[in-house]
Image: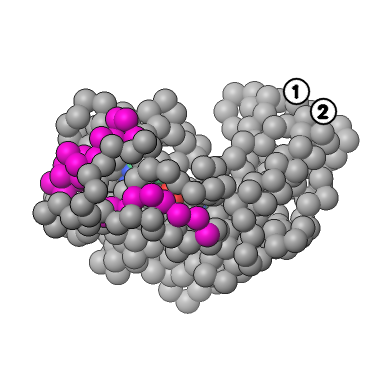
Amino acid sequence: MLCIFEHLYFRMIALEKKVSLKTWNSFGVDVFTDFFAVFRSPEELDEILNLFDIARNPFLVIGEGNNLLFTGDFAGLVLHPGVEGIRILEEEGDTVIVSAGAGENWDHFVKYCVEKNWCGLENLSLIPGSVGSAPIQNIGAYGVELRDRMEYLEAYDLEEKRRVVLQNADCGFGYRTSIFKEPSAGRYIITRVVFRLTRKPDFRLDYGEVRALFEKRSRHTAEDLRQTIIDIRRSKLPETDQYGNAGSFFKNPVVANPVFKCIEANYREVPHYPAGENMVKIPAAWLIEQAGWKGKRIGNVGTWPFQPLVIVNYGGAAGKEIYEFSERIREDVETKFGIALEREVQVL
Ligand SMILES: Cc1cc2nc3c(=O)[nH]c(=O)nc-3n(C[C@H](O)[C@H](O)[C@H](O)COP(=O)(O)OP(=O)(O)OC[C@H]3O[C@@H](n4cnc5c(N)ncnc54)[C@H](O)[C@@H]3O)c2cc1C
């Protein structure tokens, strides 16, 4: 039972009841939440926390819903951080320390920085979502991760019931992970993220086709690198407003060298990358393709023909259908290669 007051307004905070989450998840799954509230400042968040007993009731923070799969309605409170604002905190030499509210759209923030020639985030262009969600899985693309550019973040600590500042080193960042996933899932609500950027570009080009495409361009500015990344992404990934999806459904598995050697003995062409001492990363897309799932479709769910790591809702699929489809892929990959794929998407 939810311990919540029946009235819907508390000062300026609206607590809406029975809200559809269809536009709040990029799979476009049609589910409802019991309660929905937006906060626009840490003070508004305090007010909501006074009103809603978060320790005793289910709650979920949704940025823009690009990494979530709902398999049913949510019986609790969905909180959306709407904290806005991009500000320079400090400038010294070529270094610019910039802060962005959790509710800013990630790509809007990247574009803003690139236009000001504050460099460092270009490779992370066009990743869907909000600034506040970016640290959760340490977003990464084309050789750059959030942890390479983040200085610190501000959050509300639900355990200690106070606002805190977490430095980069406190966040336990790893490949598509952080303490916000494990071991402190649900403990912090991020309100602002601060980045260390530079006016002196140090472009990261050594990933896939980035260098070749960037060098073909007539200019070589941060804006050109951003456009190169956008062009690559658009050629590979479906647009979420046309085809519901959450980007990569699974993480690329990192396996011990002997496991890799066993696979290589049967598949000499297996793509792979070093991933620390005696560890090897294998692209999940390749494993899925080898297991026969590239471009496969069952009813309204399928893998994207150009990138089998992306599972697509071709229209009207229920969350459970998408989940079951993903489980069949997982089973087949495990049967064929003995590798258990780990989900990148959070299933609820
Ligand atoms: C087409 C497509 C391409 C993608 N490409 C990439 C890619 O290249 N690289 C990559 O890393 N990811 C990628 N993703 C995944 C996704 O963009 C990221 O995970 C992004 O950070 C999700 O942002 P969001 O605001 O939509 O988060 P949501 O889906 O709303 O939330 C994700 C998680 O963060 C939590 N959360 C959200 N905001 C807060 C907050 N303020 N405080 C505490 N917890 C919070 C949520 O509870 C949830 O657990 C892609 C997704 C799509 C759809």
Position of 82 relative to 42 (above/below): below
Q: Is residue 268 magenta?
A: no
**Residue tagged by mark 2?**
262
Q: Front-most of 192 and 15?
A: 15
Left or right, 174 with respect to 201, comes to right
**Lateral position of residue 193 relative to residue 59, left or right:** left
In which quadrant will I find the N terminus?
A: top left
Tell me where the magenta segment starts and ends, as one range. 30-57
Amino acid type of the residue tagged 2 in the rendering: Cys
- Quick check: can you spot residue 172? no
- The image shows residue 36 at horizontal and vertical percentages of 32, 53
Q: Is residue 147 left or right of residue 25?
A: left
| Residue 129, x across and y down, in percent | 41, 56
Q: Which mark is residue 231?
A: none
* Colour mapping used in the image: one colour
- The residue identified by callout 1 is 258
Tell me the SS state at disc 1.
Answer: helix
Mark 2 crowd level (few <14, some 14–19, many ≥20, 10 Å Cα): few
In-front residue for pair 37/89: 37
- Residue farthest along the right direction in this orientation: 266
Q: CA distance from mark 2 to mark 1?
A: 6 Å
Element marked by disc 2: helix
Q: Give the residue at x 77% y 34%.
A: 334
> Which quarter of the figure has residue 219?
bottom left
Callout 1: few (<14), some (14-19), or many (20+) C-alpha neighbours within 10 Å? few
Q: Are marks 2 and 1 in contact (CB under 8 Å)?
A: yes
Q: Is residue 108 visible?
A: yes
Q: Residue at x 34, y 50 (%)?
A: 35
